[in-house]
Image (cartoon, rainbow, N blue to C red):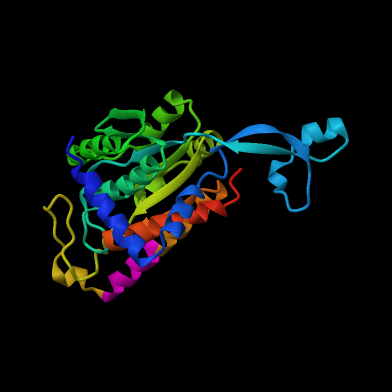
Amino acid sequence: MIMNYVTKIRAQIDIYARKKTSNLFDGSYKSIYQGNGLDFENLREYIPGDNIRDIDWKASSRSGKVLVKRYIAEKRHNILLVFDTGIKMCAHTGKLEDKKELALNAGGVLGYLAAKNGDQVGALYNSNGSIQYYPLHSGLQNVEKIMTAYEREKCSGYESDLEKSLDYMLRNIRRKGIVFVITDMAGICRLSESILKKMTCQFEVLVVGIGDADVTNGSSFRVEGQHYIPEFFSSNLRLAEKEKELKESLQAENEKKLLKYRVVSTMIHSREEMVERLVELLGGHKYAGIR
């Protein structure tokens, strides 16, 4: 298999690594394994400085001593990429880049890092009502297969149904692992608290948000290349202020909902900032206190 997408992803990561340090980048990726990426080994007595979340209260009650759980790292981790689809993914980002293309590249970076770490990567998305599932496998060829399949997905002509994908995941995937939900602001808004609660009980969950274009930024706004905003409308200052307020309010509501379930998220508007935003996401998960 010719790995066109993986080659491009590697180039993007190399550019970032030259600007930063590879140690920072590797450490950010490994930081996501603070919860389900560890297997229980045994108990030991509490030492000042231990995480109180690791205290086994039942065992402590029985023994009369404060005991904490010890963990060992799994040899392999399971990484699942859940992509959003539907007509809204055919639109532009705030930097006038294709939303679906940016989602594809974000998933590719995460899949590439996982594969290079020896982890298994899977993916799923809703293709106009039909769930497309790619089981967990290791290796860069598997990442290339996932990216090729999602790139070929025709998102036009139907509405998004992200929760159907997530419901499929909850019903059919029993392996513990880490789930990256790749959607946009509207997709996050539509995530019910019920589905978030179920997801975070079963998996580690991180959200990658793909930004939306501003209708009032003075540039053409596109969905499927068909619809353009007239200049007199897009340059309206009062409308621009209202749009800004609405987006800020929606963003705040989304963040509040995700933080309630200790889900770390990021918002990406361009390929230029993508790798850095993903590094921040992975690093932020380390300090989220998830389980």
Residue 267: which quarter of the image?
bottom left
Q: Looking at the picture, tell me which residue is in the foreground, 65 or 156.
A: 65
In the displayed orientation, state which residue is furthest to the bottom. 237
Front residue of this view, candidates 161 and 108? 108
Q: In terms of image quadrants, where is residue 154? A: top left
- Asked if residue 2 lies left or right of residue 134, the reply is left
Residue 261 visible in image: yes
Q: Name the quadrant of the N terminus.
A: top left
Q: Is residue 276 above or below residue 145?
A: below
**Residue visible at 28% across and 56% down in the picture:** 12
**Residue 170 placement (x, y as % from top left):** 46, 29
Please tell me whether the stretch drawn in magenta is mainly helix, strand or loop.
Answer: helix
Whether residue 254 can be seen here = no
Q: Measured from the top left, where is residue 139 in percent x and y?
A: 33, 35
The answer to whether residue 174 is above or below residue 291 is above
Is 243 covered by the magenta stretch?
yes
Q: Residue at x 28, y 29 (%)?
A: 132
Task: From this view, report whether residue 136 is shown above or below residue 106.
Answer: above
Residues drawn in magenta: 237-247
Q: Is residue 100 magenta?
A: no
